[in-house]
């Protein structure tokens, strides 16, 4: 087999999801949780305004002086801690993570693995191929979701942008994931549903890409990605598995 490691995007590749962080519900539920745990704001609108301001500062600080600012991924968890401080209280990282999870759940209206995702990962691992998550995501949202779905047991390694401080399409992000696996780009494959971040980003690091055009791919992404070694309509794990195993 050509590949030792397969890197997977998460949302739109393994998980089907819809979130809306601008809706009223997540801010109302976060306001209620913070109020019950010691941080007080006049209302949900005041809370959202404070969050937006703190988050903007967090992003600005993280990206200051970066050659490619858009490739820097600040961790949002400290923003939830600062919300407590601004609301007249103090919070441990654990309490801030609970607040973040309350917000994430309230902002999510659709969530679940694509059918066959765990079985596909299992077949690759049985064949001796390492399965690695390589996701642009916030760990305080994503790690609980990985546990809920059972992906934490189905993957050999989890690499999340907010924990690495960098994001796709930076080639450094992909190379970091391969460093953890002690392998080289010519022995790795990236599977994702976004042309620029997943396929073109992987290619910039010398990594082949399989493109899954799913319902939550970017609207301006093509149905077939010319740069991918394989393009599939939807989460076609059967065709993906056959390709990787050379069947």
Image (cartoon, helix red, strand yellow):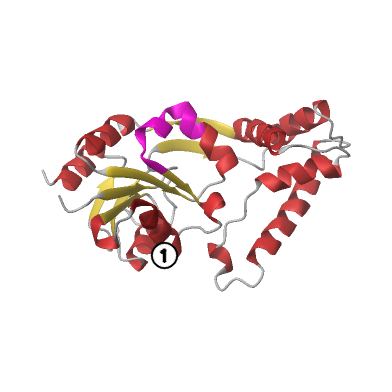
Q: Is residue 243 magenta?
A: no
Q: Is residue 152 magenta?
A: yes
Q: Is residue 169 visible?
A: no
Disc 1 element? helix
Q: Position of residue 110 (x, y in %)?
A: 50, 31
**Which portion, as a residue range, is magenta?**
145-157
Crowding at mark 1 (Cα within 10 Å: few <14, some 14-19, many 20+): many
Q: Position of residue 75 (x, y in %)?
A: 62, 50
Residue 127 % position (x, y): 19, 38
Left or right position of 71 against 131: right
Q: With respect to residue 13, does 94 lie above or below?
A: above
Q: Pick the residue in front: 77 or 220.
A: 77
**Relative to residue 138, is residue 156 drawn left or right?**
left
Check the image and name the residue furthest to the left.
247
Q: In front here: 78 or 221? A: 78
Q: Quadrant of the C terminus?
A: top left
Whether residue 105 can be seen here:
yes
Residue 192 x, y percent position in the rendering: 36, 50
Please tell me which residue is depicted at 48% across the width and 27% down the height of the picture: 148
In the displayed structure image, the side of residue 185 where residue 169 appears, left or right: right
> In the displayed structure, does residue 231 sit left or right of residue 81?
left
What's the magenta bit mostly, secondary-structure-wise? helix
| Farthest front residue in view | 182
Write the residue at 30% across / 66% down: 206
Q: Residue at x 37, y 49 (%)?
A: 193
Q: Using the rendered view, name the quadrant where residue 156 is placed.
A: top left
- Which residue does the numbered mark 1 point to in the structure image? 171
Please state which of residues 87 and 90 is positioned toward the viewer in this rendering: 90
């Amino acid at each position: 087999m050509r590949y030792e490691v397969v890197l997977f995007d998460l949302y739109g590749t393994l998980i089907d999801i819809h979130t809306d962080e601008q809706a009223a519900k997540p801010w109302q539920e976060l306001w209620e949780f913070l109020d019950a745990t010691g941080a007080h704001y006049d209302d949900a609108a005041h809370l959202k305004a404070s969050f937006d301001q703190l988050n903007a500062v967090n992003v600005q600080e993280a990206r200051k002086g970066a050659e490619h600012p858009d490739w820097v991924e600040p961790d949002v968890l400290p923003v939830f801690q600062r919300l407590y401080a601004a609301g007249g209280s103090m919070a441990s990282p654990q309490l801030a993570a609970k607040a973040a999870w309350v917000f994430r759940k309230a902002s999510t209206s659709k969530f679940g693995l694509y059918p066959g995702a765990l079985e596909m990962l299992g077949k690759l691992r049985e064949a001796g191929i390492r399965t690695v998550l390589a996701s642009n995501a916030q760990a305080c949202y994503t790690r609980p979701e990985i546990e809920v779905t059972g992906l934490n047991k189905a993957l050999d390694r989890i690499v999340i942008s907010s924990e690495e401080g960098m994001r796709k399409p930076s080639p450094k992000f992909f190379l970091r994931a391969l460093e953890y696996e002690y392998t080289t780009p010519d022995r790795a494959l990236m599977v994702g549903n976004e042309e620029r971040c997943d396929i073109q980003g992987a290619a910039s690091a010398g990594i082949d890409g399989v493109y899954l055009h799913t319902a939550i791919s970017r609207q301006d992404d093509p149905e077939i990605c010319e740069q991918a070694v394989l393009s599939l309509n939807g989460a076609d794990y059967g065709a993906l598995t056959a390709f990787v195993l050379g069947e």
